[in-house]
Image (tube, rainbow, N blue to C red):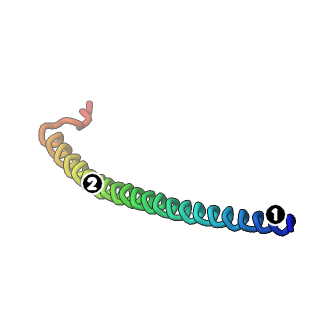
Amino acid sequence: MEIAIGTLVAVIGCFIGLAGWISKRDDKIDSDGKWKGGVDVKLNNIQSGVSGVSDRMNRMEGKFEEHEKRITRVETTIGIGKEKSN
């Protein structure tokens, strides 16, 4: 009879331990999912910011080309940049 009571207590203890382990595992999976979702949102924000920088850089390059042409016209008009021949 003592062995049966000890076995019963051990089995009950195993079930309690298993229930606690499953509960903690579910909590961990839930918190990992929330963390991953937060990381995904931050990565999307970074990606959209980088795309915006690319668009701004393209517009700036266009302005630089325009300024280069204007400066070249001014230099040509006033005679800067022309080599003097002897």
**In which quarter of the view is residue 55 placed?**
bottom left
Which of 32 and 55 lies nearest the eye of the viewer? Answer: 32
Which of 26 and 72 lies nearest the eye of the viewer? Answer: 26
Using residue 27 as the reference point, say whether residue 7 is left or right of it. Answer: right
Which of 36 and 27 lies nearest the eye of the viewer? Answer: 27
Q: In the rendering, at what x and y percent does residue 10 appear?
A: 77, 63
The structure residue drawn at horizontal position 16% and vertical position 47%, both measured from the top left corner, is: 70
The structure residue drawn at horizontal position 69% and vertical position 68%, both measured from the top left corner, is: 15
* Real-space CA distance between mark 1 and mark 2, rounded to the nearest whole angstrom: 75 Å
Q: In the rendering, at what x and y percent does residue 34 appear?
A: 46, 61
The structure residue drawn at horizontal position 86% and vertical position 68%, both measured from the top left corner, is: 1
Give the secondary structure at mark 1.
helix
Classed neighbour count for the residue bearing mark 1: other residues with Cα under 10 Å, few (<14), some (14–19), many (≥20): few
Label 1, on which residue?
6
The tag earlier along the polypeptide, 1 or 2, is 1
Q: Are marks 1 and 2 in contact (CB under 8 Å)?
A: no
Classed neighbour count for the residue bearing mark 2: other residues with Cα under 10 Å, few (<14), some (14–19), many (≥20): few
Label 2, on which residue?
56
Residue 53's disc is none
Locate the C terminus by quadrant.
top left
Q: In the rendering, at what x and y percent does residue 36 appear?
A: 48, 60
Q: Amino acid at mark 2?
A: Arg
Number of on-image labels: 2
Q: In this picture, is 43 found above or below 67?
A: below
Q: In this picture, is 70 found above or below 84?
A: below
Query: In the image as oriented, which residue stretches furthest toward the top?
Result: 86
The structure residue drawn at horizontal position 39% and vertical position 60%, both measured from the top left corner, is: 41
Q: In the rendering, at what x and y percent does residue 62 appear?
A: 25, 54
Foreground mark, 1 or 2, reads 1
Give the secondary structure at mark 2.
helix
Q: Amino acid at mark 1?
A: Gly
